[in-house]
Every structure is written in structure tokens, then in C-alpha cells.
Amino acid sequence: MRTTVAIRLLLFSFVLLALSHGASAQIGVGISVSFGPPPLPVYDQPVCPDDGYLWTPGYWAYDDDDGYYWVPGTWVEAPQVGFLWTPGYWGWGDNAFFFHEGYWGPQVGFYGGINYGFGYGGFGYEGGRWEGNHFSYNTYVNHVNTTIIHNTYNVRVTNVTETHVSYNGGDGGVQSRPTPQEDAYAKERHVGPVPAQTQHVQAARGNPEFRASANHGKPPVAATAKPGDFKTGVVPARQAGGEYKAPPANAARGNQARPGSGNEARPGTENRPGNTTEAHPNTYNHASELQPHKGTPPSTGNEATDKKYQQQQDKLAAQQAKDHQKLQQQQEKEHQQAAQKNYNDAQKQQMEQRHAQQTQQIEQKHASQQQQMAQRQAPRPASRPPAEKPR
């Protein structure tokens, strides 16, 4: 048994060593898809709900079971003063499309050259800036109620291109590469999506109307005023960004280890189904790859009981999201320290092994919590009347 474990660790070490190239190299596991996402739909931006909310553009995410689905653009509170959002993007590489997760940081890094609009024209961000402890909005590209939010300015922004292409590289993709400055930004301190964003993605994934196969590239809710709220202050797509082409069946190739350059966040949150009962659970190397498990909607037949059970599920989901964020921030900090201290291959290998172990442990813990809750909330069979005693 010990020999088998040692051999597996040795093989894993060889893979890490082979994929390591340079102090800023990162290794991630993410879903790869052989066909690109649909074009970005055309939509208007909802009104900013309050001071301190920053715009995060909508994008196409992917699920093994349902294919591409739309994650509506939304306003999100920044995790801390001075942080800006770098959107995620789909990129072509190794004969497949991989998703590069977005992140919060002091500067806006590379996001594939994708023109998401509303200040994200493909390079940098022109929708606003931090001035001291307040965010100032550029009303030329942002929909802001200036009678409520006074820290605004108006500077004309000209988009270089009006394309609605939603991926970088490959056939028909945006041909853009990160600048040295964007590479440097990616190495600065940053954190992944906040819990509200993660829950927003989860809610979008569970809505059948958001699937490209159902809306043909024109989602019924293209943007929302606040994350996770698909009823209040929502904006529908005005039109699809281009012709929707139905993808071939079973085109996803599953999880694969691959090297990533220093300008990328590790492939992340849309890379696995949330079913906690799947026979062969995926393997994750970093907390940024984890996503909340799908809870089974309560269906006891009693409205009050179902409401109580749903509140319990929501509370557990919020706590698990905090666990994910805490571990992700810890791992990101260690990656930055590794780059600053110029770790050698052996040190990188040890760090990656430790991160993989931490990630698997928290994933197993959360899967167990979900399973226990499902068992507690399962409808109980009706009690039988006592058997009649023989006379």
C-alpha cells in the first residue's frame, strides 16, 4: 500500500515538474470544451443600486450537463477599497477552450481582449476609478442615478471594435495578448470572486432559461442590479450578439491539468456539476476551482417546512462559500510569496501538493455536509397504523 502511494506521489511530482516553467507559472485544472461560447448578447446596463458597487460584465459559462449558459452582468460590492474587477474570459489553447476566472485586484489585468462593454472595451477599465475611499463613476459608460450618487465624472470612451466575439484565440477569436504591464498586474495581490458572485453563478446555472440551447444566444435576463436577484431591476437582452450555432453532442473533454501563464487566474468556477452523488468526483488542485454544491430543492409538501429547509440550505451554502474564499485567499498569498522568493521546482512542487490536499479535504467536507443535510431533509414515509392484535 505504501509503495503504491509513493509511486503515485512520484508520478504527480513529475507532472508538476514538467509543467513548471518560470517563477510565475501556475498549474490548474479546468474543463476544456472543443467549441467556443456564443457571441455576447446586446443589452443595456441596469442602474447602479448604490455607492460602492462595481460593474461585473455578463459572460457565457459552461456546465457538463447543460452546455453553455449565461451569467448575467451585475453590480457587486468591491471586497475592499481600491480593488477593481478583472473579468474572466474563454481562451483557446491545447486544441480546446479553457475558462480563465476573473479576480479582484488593485489593477485591471488581461481579460482576453474581449469587448464586454460598459467600460471594459478589451483593455483596462474606463468605467470608473477610486478616489480615496470612494469609487467615482464615469457616467459616459455607466448607468448611474446622479441624484443619489454624486461621485461621478463624464469622459468619452470610444470602443476600438464593436465585435461581440466572446473568446480569445482560435478560429474567429479575438487575437490579443497580454502586455508586460498586464503581466505585472496579474502578479499583484488579488482575490477571486466574492461569495455573492459565486452564488450568482450558481443561481444562473440552475435556471434552464439561461442555457444557450434554450435562448439561442439571447438570454431573457442579461443583467441584474444585484447578484442573485433575477426579478428586481433586471434587463433582458435586446438581441443576440450573432448567429447561435448549436454545439455537437458531448463536445466537452473533461478536466485536464495544464500549465498557465502568470497573467492568468487558474481555470475556475464553471468546471463541474454540483451533484454531490456523482460516482467519480472531479479532482481539484486549488480552492479557486471549487464551486458550491447544488442543493436539492425541498419538497415535503409542507410550505412552512420547505421554507425552513431552504433557509438551512442557504445558510450552509453561505458558510461553504466563506470557507472557499478563505482557503483561496490563503493559497493566493502563498503563490505570491513563492513568486517573490523565487521558489525552485522542488519548493513549488511541495506547495502545489499541499494546496491539492487542502482543496480535496474541504471539498470532501462540504460534500459530506450536503449529503447529511439531504438525508435530514428527505421526506419521511407516512407512519403505518399499528397492526391489529390477533383475537
Image (cartoon, rainbow, N blue to C red):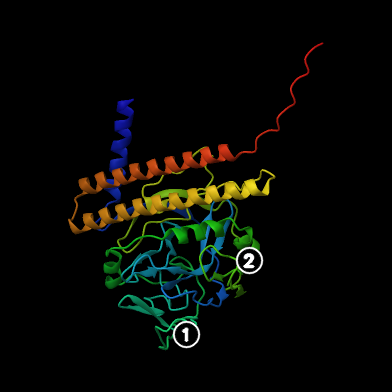
Nearer the observer: mark 1 or 2; the answer is 1
Q: Is residue 114 left or right of residue 309?
A: left
Instruction: Tell me the amino acid under the disc marked 1.
Output: Thr
Q: Secondary structure at mark 2?
A: loop
**Residue in front for this viewpoint, 80 or 178:** 80
Give the residue at the far top of this rendering. 391
**Residue in front for this viewpoint, 79 or 335:** 79
Q: Secondary structure at mark 1?
A: loop
Q: Is residue 343 left or right of residue 380?
A: left
For label 1, the crowd category at 10 Å Cα-Cα, with few meaning under 14, some 14 to 19 and many 20 or more, is: few
Which residue lies under the disc numbered 1? 146
Quarter occupied by residue 126: bottom left
**Where 81 falls versus 66 (above or below)?**
below
Residue 274: percent from the left, percent from the top?
52, 48
**Residue in front for this viewpoint, 336 or 36:** 336
The C terminus is located in which quarter?
Answer: top right
The residue that appears at 35% across and 78% down in the rendered structure is 129
Residue 37: percent from the left, percent from the top?
53, 64
Q: Is residue 251 left or right of residue 13?
A: right
Which residue lies under the disc numbered 2? 216
Q: Is residue 22 left or right of residue 28?
A: left
Label 1 and label 2: CA atoms lie apart by 36 Å
For label 2, the crowd category at 10 Å Cα-Cα, with few meaning under 14, some 14 to 19 and many 20 or more, is: some
Residue 205: percent from the left, percent from the top?
56, 57
The numbered mark, 1 or 2, whose residue comes first in the sequence reads 1
**Where 11 falls versus 187 (above or below)?**
above
Residue 302: percent from the left, percent from the top?
68, 46
Instruction: Tell me the amino acid under the disc marked 2.
Output: His
The residue that appears at 65% across and 61% down in the rendered structure is 214
Q: Is any atom of residue 36 visible in this view? A: no
Q: Is any atom of residue 334 visible in this view? A: yes
**Residue in front for this viewpoint, 52 or 104:** 52
